[in-house]
Image (spheres, rainbow, N blue to C red):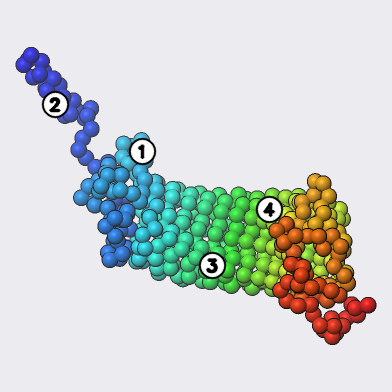
Amino acid sequence: MATSKFFLSSLLLLLFVHGVLPRAESKTYWGDVDALKQLKNGVQPNSVNPGSCLGSWDFTFDPCDSLFSERFTCGFRCDLTVSGLSRVTEVTLDSAAYTGSLSSISWNLPYLQTLDLSNNFFSGGIPGSLSNLTRLTRLGLSRNAFSGEVPASIGSLSTLEELYLDNNNLQGPIPPTFNGLGSLKRLEIQSNNISGELPELGSLKNLYFLDASNNVISGYLPTTLPPSLVQIFMRNNMIEGTIPPSLKYLNLLQVLDLSHNKLTGSVPYFLFNHPSLQQLTLAFNSFDSLQAPSNLGTQSELIAVDLSNNELQGWLPPFLPLMPKLSALSMENNKFSGMIPIQYALRAALPASGIAPFARLLLGGNYLFGPIPGPLLVLKPDTANVSLADNCLIRCPSLFFFCQGADQKSLMECKSFGSVIP
């Protein structure tokens, strides 16, 4: 028995010497360890809570070998390479109110695919050295305090699929080098101080989501946009001019929000018979008319349309109630006049079979005159949100919920607008 134990011990020793059993050596590539150290050193020590991800990073231990232990509880991920070394492929910090600047970090993490530092208080400029992350597919810097211009070098990240720079203090224009982001699918730069014109992004053939809202972007809408776009949000900027005809070629577009800008002219017909558009928001601009589609909107996919707070005038367009899926229509605070077409009232109170009812019909703040359409008189408050307040209707007592709010305009104001009162 003693001979057997001696033989087994000798065999284990032999296997260890010849490397068959794992050796007690570093599993993480030394350059990746150094990059993680730089990241932690860039964070203000007084913002690192002991219970946070960075608070657990103890570099007296091997990071990848100790991941998910008490020494490195979270914040990154490693993958084993063919060389036998572990490489850092993801850095995702927790939302722990970290502060500090990352501008001096070299970001030499060639295997990194995801970098997400969102929901913290990092400040200073976005480091141009992020271009070293040549395998990066996701970059998340949202909801921090980054300032300065967006580095042009980010445009060299040809594998990047998701870019989140929203809710910071970034300024200056969007670099034209962004046209080099050929793999980009999602771009969020909203809620900054981005200025200048939106560059031509037609080369981003995979981009399906664009949000550049709440900035100070000026100039005109680009004449070419990626045909892959599904959702566009550019509300609350300083964009002027008209809606370019190129938008009708975005056959996958489902959501278009250009509200709170300086757009003028007519709302083009192709938005009302678009093959996929479901939500159209053009409120708070200076549009003065609507172009009727040739099919009168009967093939429209629109569910919600907001044209409120523009300069739209004339009679209410007859094609809008013909859109079979439209359930929310806001056209308040314009200059519409004439009588309310019976089709609008029927869609709210007595819609035809297979037609979506108007769950929202906001026509207040115009110069509509005449009697209240009969079907609305039987409408109950819990069935639809309808408003006819602040118009020129003959009788609209507050007894009816859709007349509540602002009173009807005075006869003098209604007549001064034009010959609208018989």
Q: Which mark is residue 254?
A: 4
- Separation (CA) of disc 2 from disc 3: 63 Å
Q: Residue at x 51, y 63 (%)?
A: 166
Instruction: Tell me which label, 3 or 1, sits earlier in the chain.
Output: 1
Q: Which residue, as the protein is rendered here, is positioned at the far right? A: 422
Q: Is residue 232 visible?
A: yes
Image coordinates of residue 245 in percent, x first then y, are 76, 60
Q: Is residue 274 visible?
A: no
- Separation (CA) of disc 3 from disc 4: 22 Å
Disc nearest the viewer among 4 and 2: 4
- Separation (CA) of disc 4 from disc 2: 67 Å
Residue corresponding to mark 3:
191
218 sits to left or right of 177:
right
Residue corresponding to mark 2:
13
Disc 1, SS: loop
Disc nearest the viewer among 2 and 3: 3
Q: Residue at x 85, y 68 (%)?
A: 372
Image coordinates of residue 307 in percent, x first then y, are 74, 66
Residue corresponding to mark 1:
81
Please say if the residues under marks 3 and 1 sit with CB atoms less than 8 Å apart: no
Q: Which of the 4 quarters of the picture holds residue 176?
A: bottom right
At label 4, counting other C-alpha atoms closer than 10 Å, the crowd grade (few under 14, some 14-19, many 20 or more) is some
Instruction: Tell me which label, 2 or 1, sits earlier in the chain.
Output: 2
Residue type at mark 4? Gln
Of residues 209 and 393, the one nearer the viewer is: 393
Image coordinates of residue 82 in percent, x first then y, are 36, 35
Q: Quadrant of the C terminus?
A: bottom right
